[in-house]
Image: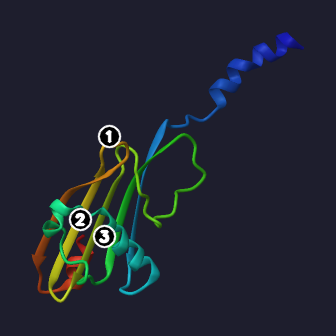
Amino acid sequence: MGLLLLALLPLAVHAAPDVPDSLRVSSTSTYAPGTPEWRQVRDWLAQQRTRKDVMSMGNLDRLGPIVLTYVRMLHGVQTRAPEPLPLPDQGTPDDSIAIASCIGGVRQSWLYSVETRPAGAWLLTSFATSQTADCKQADSTH
């Protein structure tokens, strides 16, 4: 019996599917102004502010629909992708969060990545504001 199991072992190894060490998952969601999800994203942006970057952070009182893109590295086997909300206080290397909003012809966008020190802290890597004639078109090109 032991010899039979040893003989079948190489077949089992070749039959097993390759499982990746990690998987990059991206989700994009749009939240209407005033919804609980919209408030969660706005509140998360407010929590990320520091005194030195308040002026560069845009106007959180002037947000339209929010487009949230969250890219995460999943390590090990996952049965399904995690939900985009609530946004985490910390991330892991290679995670990123992009948030864009447009109202009244003013488009604002934020891009965050993860710092290694302090471990897992979100770092604002880009903020942009621009004028646009059509917020619907601007939202579709986030």
Quadrant of the image containing the N terminus: top right
Give the left or right position of residue 48, taking residue 74 as reference. left
Seen from the viewer's position, the closer of residues 58 and 9 is 58
For residue 104, what is the image quadrant?
A: bottom left
Give the left or right position of residue 16, taking residue 90 as reference. right
- The residue identified by callout 1 is 116
Task: Give the percent coordinates (x, y) of residue 44.
Answer: 36, 68
Q: Residue furthest right?
A: 1
Give amino acid for label 1.
Answer: Thr
Give amino acid for label 3.
Answer: Ala
- Numbered badge on residue 110: 2
User: How is this picture coloured?
Assistant: rainbow
- The residue identified by callout 3 is 46
Rate crowding at label 1 as few (under 14), some (14 to 19) or many (20 or more) other CA atoms within 10 Å. Answer: few
- Real-space Cα separation, disc 1 to disc 3, in angstroms: 21 Å
Q: Residue furthest bottom?
A: 104
